[in-house]
Amino acid sequence: MTSIFKPFNVDIKYNQRIIMRDNISLSADIYFPKDRNKPLPVILTRTPYDNSSDDIVESAIYFAQKGYIFVAQDTRGRNDSEGEFRPWIDEFNDGFDTLEWIGIQPWCDSNIGMVGGSYVGNVQWQAASMGSEYLKTIIPRVIGDNLHESPHYQGGAFQLGWSATWSWRQDGRTTQSLKLYDWNQLFMTLPLKKLDEFAGKNVDFFREWISHPDYDYYWKELAIKERYQDIKIPVLQIGGWYDFFTAGTFNNYIGMKELGGSDLARSNQKVILGPWVHNAGSLSYAGDMDYGLDSKLDILPIELEWFNYWLKGINNRVKEQPDIKIFTMGINKWVEENQWPLENTVYTKYYFHSNGSSNSLFGDGFLSIEPPVLEPEDSYIYNPAFPVPTLGGNTCCNPNIISWGAYDQSSIEARNDVLVYTSELLESDLEVTGNIVVKLYASSDCIDTDFTAKLVDVYPNGSAINLCDGIIRARYRESTVHQKTIEPYKIYEYEINLWPTSNIFEKGHKIRVDISSSNFPRFDRNLNTGGEFALEDEFKLASQKIYHNSDYKSHIILPIIIR
């Protein structure tokens, strides 16, 4: 059906059917510039969230006005498209088939780009790995390299908050309401495998995700990082420091620079990273922190400039622009770089210290570049019935259920099961830009448990603003591919990846690291029994010890930038 209206000099054909290789028909709305008289390049977006949503319509009209044809398609099993919705799985073939259909249309000049964020970003990577001759470039926003590590797991822990709420919303042909449930109660469900059943639902793909806790064949077949060599086109990625795909964004950049399937791809990878949560660019704030109007970017003109170069051949110097544009928090300024990690990075260890009582912000824990010698270990009890609550951080996507972004952590740090290590007042500004890692030497009286870490910027007024955080499940300390429980009371080294950030700790501020064993409901609770994941319905208390002495120097590694 063609629209009888001509809004904004655009002609629209609704519900155009595109047939996949298995005869399933997918629906697409196609936006044409009015009075076009020749084939034009095409921009494609493929979404499970409704191809007539306001943001997609805005993009479609914008690009049609700029001389592009815009195709907005509902993915399989969603809204007006036929078939069964199986998240992630069908997007490789469906994306390729859609590109091949568009490429032979008389209105297409054989040049196609793709655009969109999150799930809509991942389908771009998936389509790009299939090698369609028509796809010339993609602009994926807020998406990573590996669906196991995000959004579904991280460090072996299940990302419960997102996985449950997202699957509830997408359990059907159209988006479902989340307001029908008591999420505080629902997240506490045991065993976890029956969470959907207790809610009166039967979400097959949610159960599928929790049936694959390891990074196994299921996730490897879906992972972009396993397919870099198949991707032969330029890529512009856009992400946010408080998104949960930040690490994956930089992994993609490095992976494509090293392993991309062509010289063209390896030489044309670019990244923009702002101080944003999952809705990149549209807000100047993340949680309680506002980073100023300069932190907002109008994404559409940036995408247009990129497409003009790669799809229309307009010499607008896109290729000569720096590879990386990042927003440095603290001083709240954009910085341009040409490699990641940054060339002038000095990796510096800040060691944990205490007299054995670093519990809470009222304890005696401190950070120093001096290594520990003779110090007693810190200890706390992790009780799965009373987990440390999520307060902001790199998570997504329903802030009325789970907070995301930057918040004052003081209420969390008042708990006795949170160890707090704080530096002295900084005498000068200190820039930290890059990936943050904690090396933790710890023991537990259980055969499995979790350890969490959080990097915090402490302001002169006492506000403790989180920058990035991470988790490691003990059974995955060696690899997320294989499980191996621990021996009670034995000291192990745990590497906790807190992912990247960029922040200047200003003069008069302090650097802080929080250590605990839960971050709930962002991550599921480790029940400390070592039982089969998602089938346990009982838990144990865990007695945790963190060591910092001459033999076991627990520390955080900060990528300090010398300018």
Image (tube, rainbow, N blue to C red):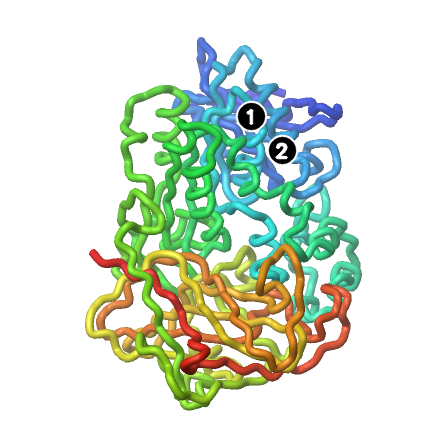
Give me the residue at 52% from left, 28% from top. Answer: 44
- Where on the picture, by quarter, is residue 73? top right
Quadrant where the N terminus sits is top right
Q: Choose the circle earlier in sequence order: 2 or 1.
A: 2
Residue 423: give x, y in percent of width and height: 32, 78
For residue 50, above or below residue 414: above
Along the viewing direction, whichever of 367 and 112 lies nearer the viewer: 367
Q: Secondary structure at mark 1?
A: loop
Give me the residue at 76% from left, 70% from top. Answer: 536
Residue 415: give x, y in percent of width and height: 50, 83
Q: Secondary structure at mark 2?
A: helix
Is there a contact, CB below 8 Å, between mark 2 and mark 1?
no
- Where on the picture, by quarter, is residue 297? top left
Decide if residue 199 is on the left or right side of residue 497: right
Residue 535: give x, y in percent of width and height: 77, 66
- Where on the picture, by quarter, is residue 517? bottom right
How packed mark 1 is, by other alpha carbons closer than 10 Å (few <14, some 14-19, many 20 or more), is: some
**Amino acid type of the residue that numbered disc 2 sits on in the rendered structure:** Phe
**Of marks 2 and 1, the one in the foreground:** 1
Q: Which residue is mark 1?
A: 131
Along the viewing direction, whichever of 262 and 91 lies nearer the viewer: 262
Decide if residue 185 is on the left or right side of residue 286: right
Decide if residue 204 is on the left or right side of residue 322: right
Is residue 157 in view from this perspective? yes
Give me the residue at 37% from left, 32% from top. Answer: 267
Q: Which residue is mark 2?
A: 92
Quadrant where the C terminus sits is bottom left
Specify the label residue 363 is tagged with.
none
Residue 436: give x, y in percent of width and height: 41, 62
Give me the residue at 49% from left, 20% from top. Answer: 32
Find the distance from the CA under tag 2 to the CA under tag 1: 10 Å
**Amino acid type of the residue that numbered disc 1 sits on in the rendered structure:** Gly
